[in-house]
Image (cartoon, grey):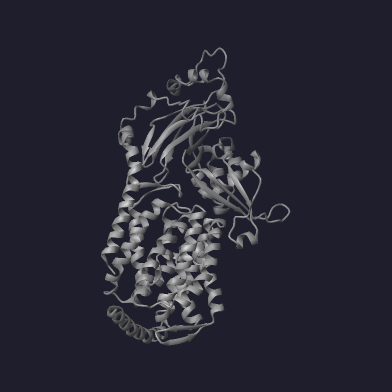
Amino acid sequence: MITKKNIILILLFLLAMGSYYIHPGEAQDPAAPTESVQHAPPPAAVTTVLPAPGAEVAPPAPGVEEAPPAHLAVAPPAPGAEEAPSVPPAVAPPPPNVTLSIDKTSVVNGGVVTVKGQGVSGKPIYLEVWSERQVRSSFFDSKPDKDGKIPYRLYLTQAMPASYKIYAPKGKKEVFDAFKAKGGGWSYSDALKEMGADVAYSAPSKIAIDAYQSTILASIIGSRGEKLATLDDKETRRRAMQLTKARFRGIGNLISPSIEQNTDGSFIAKVNIPQGAAPGKYFIVAYADNALRSQPAVVENNISFPTMYLANAGTSLNLVWPFLLTLAIGVFGVLMGAGGGFLLNPLLISLWPLPHTVVAGTVMPTVAFSQASGIYNYSKIKFINWKLGVTMGIATLAGGFIGPKLTELITLDQYKFVFGWILIVLAALMFWQTTPGYLKKNKREQAIMSEFKKRAEAAAKAK
Amino acid sequence: MIVEFWGQEFKVNIIFGCIGAFLVSILASMFGFGGGPFMVPLMTVGLGLPMYLVVGSSLITIFFNTVMGSLRHYQFGNFDMTFFLIMFPAAILGGYIAPQIAKRISPLMVKRVAVVGLMLLALNLLGLY
């Protein structure tokens, strides 16, 4: 039913949408993101060893803090050192130092940043790259521990970097491939340890994590359970690894064995800030071991409309595509008589790196409005039995209270698995609706229905 | 419970209906869909009600669930405003376009396409191809 009121409602929403995205757009203008990429000076000229700005965000390295001036003094020769790294008449070997430089300080909608630097000879170098933007990540521990007891604990953090990756030397590729072959069951902490990359695991290791003890009763009343005491440092580090894996899933998203390192310790790597990554600052730190690390280099990722950052999902999206997808699914959903959610949810999580919790939590209110308009249309012609609808509706209130909590407790893979079976059941139902027996019965009921509808519409008009 | 609709009366096992609705709504709110296609067969086959009564009434039932589920998802921080503002107008627009198309094509054909599409999507989700 196209009414004036409805059209005005849509326009209002489009307007609201417009005013919503003006903010980031304005903020980006002065930064002139496109320009800064093009005039990226030749690599040798920029030794971007930025000491101060990242200092509060990056965990201060004890080794570096001791002698910051000395470090800075060492840094400038680095560009020259790339070609002739060994300084023959060295009286005393200078204290080992790790430096790095980047070829650009900003990218637009993601991009590749070339990182050059000097590590320590004989020690593999690792790069840790993380974004300043933070997202939520949760992990439900339901694996039996050593004594066979299932902990049923929910770990939740709001401070997971929206983007996080460790780059390892190319030589570690074999270990990487072995872990990759394990599929979804790989262990992040084992992979880090065996690749030697645990020295670079730093940014997420101190995030604030809330732990909840879940119980069946708590789940029934839809609560997260009892909040446990704050985790100690060691436990935080361990759980943070599980949360990191829960958030980024595949090993290819978290580790990249792609640094080219020479025997003298110098290295070069291409750091990829993917399309769809969060906007804002990215920090890059090189590690030779726990104490030996470089100052953070900072890269700014700028995004411009129609790409926008979804703060809760931790992903930037070119919004044109989800819009078109929702439109197509919306049309098809109405035609086939099933709300769009059945198709939209699985497609959204398959096509974009969106967490299933955010997809479920955002599609649901969208569905609510089409239901409301349906109710309005049917109620106008009195085609609703309120007694039946409301009685059963109250029963569903309880279900709706419990369900969203369960979303939090399952992993994306479990979500996909169960959703797959739900769709098979739905397909079977749809198939049943195309069988001759059903169609015959349906035809009769359709006839009664259109008769009732005619009467109802006439009655509504008569008023 | 006796359900009255346009002069007709139907006897309904409401306990069974409520338990069924409760189970459907857990799944629906957990996975973030409406649940209509499950609620309708529950009411027609499970409760023996005619289709013309169910189409409207089932909407009320799942609407309760959707509102509650949305609020709970919001409470747990699963709601993304930007994402919503993109999908919402598209969904509304789809709701206006669909009836225009529906007049021109056979609903049986749509259902058959949907069966194939749903199966493909399901097998994809189960990782079978």
Residue A7 appears in the rendering: yes
Most foreground residue, A290 or A399: A399
- When the figure is inspected, residue A334 is found, relative to residue A289, above or below; the finding is below
- When the figure is inspected, residue A90 is found, relative to residue A4, above or below; the finding is above
Most foreground residue, A326 or A81: A326
Q: Quadrant of residue B119?
A: bottom left
Answer with left or right where residue A308 lies relative to residue A8: right
Q: How many marks?
A: 0
Give x and y (percent) for residue A75.
47, 21
Answer with left or right where residue A306 lies relative to residue A418: left
Give x and y (percent) for residue A237.
61, 41
Residue positioned 53% across, 14% down in the render: A90
Residue B128 appears in the rendering: no
Report the quarter where the N terminus of chain A lies.
bottom left
- When the figure is inspected, residue A46 is found, relative to residue A343, above or below; the finding is above
Q: Quadrant of residue A175?
A: top right
Give x and y (percent) for residue A159.
52, 43
Residue positioned 61% across, 60% down in the render: A219
Answer with left or right where residue A359 lies relative to residue A395: left
Most foreground residue, B55 or A308: B55
Residue positioned 31% across, 84% down in the render: A455
Q: Residue furthest right?
A: A147
Q: Quadrant of residue A365?
A: bottom left
Q: Residue furthest front?
A: A463
Give x and y (percent) for residue B8.
42, 87
Report the quarter where the C terminus of chain A lies.
bottom left
